[in-house]
Image: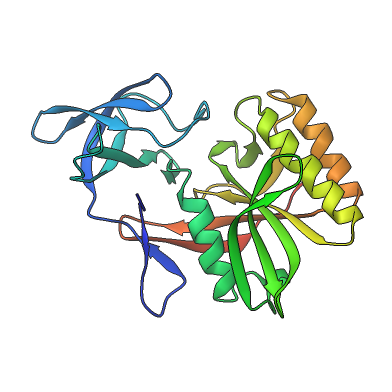
Amino acid sequence: MNSVTPTTKSASLAWPQLIPGTLVKRYKRFMADIRLKNGELVVAHCPNSGRMTSCCEPGRNVYLSYHDNPRRKLKYTWELIEMPTSLVGVNTLVPNRLAALSIETGRVESLRGYDRVKKEVNVGNHTRLDMVLQKDGRDQCYIEIKNCTLVDNGIAQFPDAVTARGLKHLETLRQLTKEGYHCVIFYLIQRTDATLFKPADSIDPAYGKALRRAAADGVEILIYDVHINLQTIMLNQKIPYLL
């Protein structure tokens, strides 16, 4: 189920109606106990498979969406958490939608000039990338989008847990670059307090090495942060990186 929907004539995504609460604990990766303002304790779906280091402290204010779908076991979805220096979007479905919308509306300068965005693209070796940009009906640019929420002293880092899947994506982008395609690894920082991006070598050194190899072979690295509040989220500015 979509967590956010495009607003008209805008490059922003509007949150659904948000329900405030307090984080009690996160567990089993995809579940969180939330105390609502009326005192009720609810179990919310946590749409984030990472460790969520730096954005998962019990006692913090959080915001949920509610989905009255009979097929859903958990009716609430955890969307945002208030950290000392920023609101943080925890839903990993949001970056793909926001990146696609931002590309389609021309907010990503290096990705302008394409006439179609095709999402969830199967590539060789049983790998799926988030999107391919096309022009005149031909595949032109392959993109993999990563959600980044780990920020320490202004430095955004990815990943926040060892990721074999992420390694596979980087290798796929490298191979496609060698075949002559424009390829992009796009890190979207769902918060406002980062001034620099680095690979999280202390968490997954293999990923850091793979990212440096990919960059050396011509894969473009894009990092953007966001404007985020309790109404909308939109792409903000390009963040520099250090490999």
In the displayed orientation, state which residue is furthest to the left. Answer: 38
Give me the residue at 36% from left, 40% from top: 82
Residue 184: image x %, image y %?
A: 74, 56
**As drawn, is 185 to the left or to the right of 33?**
right
The C terminus sits in image quarter: top right
Residue 223: image x %, image y %?
A: 66, 54
Using the image, determine if residue 25 lies above or below residue 219: above
Using the image, determine if residue 3 lies above or below residue 140: above
**As drawn, is 50 to the left or to the right of 113?**
left
**Res 218 seen here:** no
Closest to the observer: 194 or 92?
Answer: 92
Using the image, determine if residue 37 lies above or below residue 113: above
* Quarter holding residue 10: bottom left
**As drawn, is 122 to the left or to the right of 48?**
right
Give me the residue at 54% from left, 76% from top: 105
**Res 158 seen here:** yes
* Quarter holding residue 165: top right
Residue 226: image x %, image y %?
A: 51, 57
Closest to the observer: 200 or 161?
Answer: 161
Q: How many marks?
A: 0
Give me the residue at 91% from left, 50% from top: 217
